């Protein structure tokens, strides 16, 4: 875990989230979200929510972050923040906590409504890739 980050670094990341929030496509909920994350090579990746006339097809801002992570070279997420249209910190939804866990693991630092916390607290006892690897031989056989 990189704990050398200062509040100023977090503020810069939050500002990136605020900027991309303004690009959100949220004509149905009118609830714009922006998200920004630092990758382990230092680059910043961002995303905004993109809604759909078929409401359930919505892409959360976190989906954009993870897509940009891989589209720009891969790696792991180390720091994450997301905001609403007021620039206020919000919590990633349950589905997106799972998404973030996959790409940052237990040590991903998340700026939450109760301060900076690791994913191990934001999504305790998370199911993840290790669970699949634990029974990899069985899983590889496919459904019985
Ligand atoms: N939303 C996100 O983008 N991320 C979250 O973690 C919470 C919810 C979006 C989805 C939808 O477009 C809007 O916020 C209202 O739920």
Image: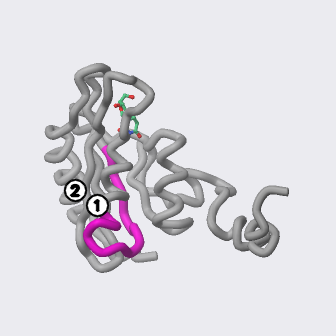
**Vertical comparison of 136 with 11: above or below:** below
Quarter of the rendering containing residue 4: bottom left
Residue 49 image-quadrant placement: top left
Point 74% across, 73% down: residue: 136
Quarter of the figure with the C terminus: bottom right
Instruction: Compare marks 2 and 1 and give the one earlier in the sequence.
Output: 2
Question: Foreground residue, 103 or 2?
Answer: 103
- The residue labelled by disc 2 is 11
Q: Nearer the viewer, residue 39 or 143?
A: 143
Q: Is residue 78 a member of the stretch shown in magenta?
A: yes
* Residue that appears at 52% across and 62% down: 102
Colour theme: one colour
- Quarter of image, res 86: top left
Vertical order, 57 against 64 (above or below): above
Crowd band around label 1 with a 10 angstrom C-alpha radius: few (<14), some (14–19), many (20+): some
Disc 2/disc 1 C-alpha distance (Å): 21 Å
Task: Give how far across and how far down residue 117 sits, in percent.
Answer: 48, 57
Picture coordinates of residue 125, whole percent (x, y): 69, 57
Horizontal placement of 45 versus 15: left or right?
Answer: right
Left-right relation of 53 to 117: left
Residue 16, magenta (yes or no): no
Mark 1 lies on residue: 68
The reply to whether the C-beta atoms of the residues labelled 2 and 1 are less than 8 Å apart is no
Label 1 secondary element: helix
Secondary element at tag 2: helix
> What number of labels is visible?
2
Residue span colored magenta: 69-82
Mark 2 Cα shell of 10 Å, populated few (<14), some (14-19), many (≥20):
few
Where is residue 133? Give x, y as percent. Answer: 71, 73
């Amino acid at each position: 875990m990189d704990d050398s980050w200062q509040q100023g670094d977090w503020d810069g990341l939050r500002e990136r989230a605020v900027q991309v929030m303004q690009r959100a496509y949220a004509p149905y909920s009118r609830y714009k979200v922006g998200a920004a994350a630092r990758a382990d090579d230092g680059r910043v990746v961002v995303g905004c929510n993109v809604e759909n006339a078929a409401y359930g097809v919505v892409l959360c801002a976190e989906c954009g972050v993870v897509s940009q992570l891989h589209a720009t070279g891969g790696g792991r997420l180390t720091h994450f923040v997301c905001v609403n249209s007021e620039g206020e910190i919000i919590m990633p939804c349950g589905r997106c906590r799972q998404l973030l866990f996959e790409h940052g693991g237990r040590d991903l630092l998340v700026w939450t409504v109760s301060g900076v916390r690791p994913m191990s607290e934001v999504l305790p006892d998370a199911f993840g890739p290790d669970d699949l690897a634990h029974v990899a031989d069985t899983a590889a056989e496919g459904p019985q």
